Image (tube, grey):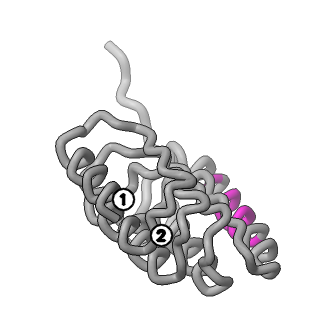
């Protein structure tokens, strides 16, 4: 946990770091809590926390940050003890994020494969929707309207 606290302090000072590779460091829930607390104000786009002894408690910390931080595009969670409920929680956070491209989940629970497959489908659908909405304006209720007109060039 102490090492993760040092990393989180460094994240507060470094606004240019794009990738944070913490995998195989056994930081646990306490460590991910410290890191998650600083991710909201960071530029990190890729976070590797595979095989870090994270449980559903750590996933809750991460999910709160992940759903709010639109910088994070990829998250590696392989080899943690997050349970199916944790996988669903991080899946929802990825959808809420809106810009997430990949979340890699695999743990000691065999049902996670189903959650990962569904999450992949959800994220692909989100990506297709975002691409199909390019060039369209939206009403306040989010419904798609006429194409945006480009201003005439002079």
**Image label count:** 2
Mark 2 or 1, closer to the camera: 1
Q: Nearer the viewer, residue 95 or 58?
A: 58
The numbered dot on residue 144 is none
| Image-based side of 51 in relation to 60, left or right | right
- Which residue is labeled 2 in the image? 96
Residue farthest toward the top in the current orientation of the protein: 154
**What segment carries the magenta color?**
118-127
Q: On the rendered structure, is 114 left or right of 70?
A: right
The front one of 93 and 33 is: 33
Q: Name the secondary structure under disc 1.
A: loop
Our reading of the magenta stretch's main secondary structure is helix
Q: In the current view of this chain or complex, which residue is farthest to the left?
A: 13
- In magenta segment, residue 33: no
> Residue 90, position in %: x, y?
54, 73
Asked whether 123 falls inside the magenta stretch, the response is: yes
Q: Position of residue 154 (x, y in %)?
A: 32, 13
- Callout 1 crowding tier (Cα within 10 Å): few <14, some 14–19, many ≥20: many
23 lies above or below 27? above
Q: CA distance from mark 2 to mark 1?
A: 10 Å
Q: Earlier in the sequence, mark 2 or mark 1?
A: 1
The quadrant holding residue 8 is bottom left
Q: Which residue in the structure is indicated by mark 1?
A: 69
Label 2 crowd (10 A; few <14 / some 14-19 / many >=20) = some
Residue, x 33% and y 43% (percent of image)? 43
């Amino acid at each position: 946990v102490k090492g993760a606290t040092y990393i989180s302090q460094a994240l507060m000072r470094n606004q240019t770091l794009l990738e944070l590779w913490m995998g195989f460091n056994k930081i646990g829930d306490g460590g991910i809590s410290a890191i998650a607390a600083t991710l909201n104000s960071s530029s990190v786009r890729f976070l590797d926390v595979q095989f870090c002894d994270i449980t559903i408690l750590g996933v809750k910390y991460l999910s709160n940050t992940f759903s709010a931080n639109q910088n994070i595009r990829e998250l590696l969670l392989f080899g943690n003890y997050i349970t199916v409920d944790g996988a669903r929680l991080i899946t929802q956070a990825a959808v809420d994020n809106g810009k997430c491209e990949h979340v890699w989940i695999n743990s000691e629970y065999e049902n996670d494969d189903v959650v990962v497959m569904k999450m992949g489908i959800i994220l692909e659908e989100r990506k297709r929707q975002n691409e199909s909405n390019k060039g369209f304006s939206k009403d306040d209720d989010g419904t798609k309207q006429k194409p945006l007109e480009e201003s005439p060039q002079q």
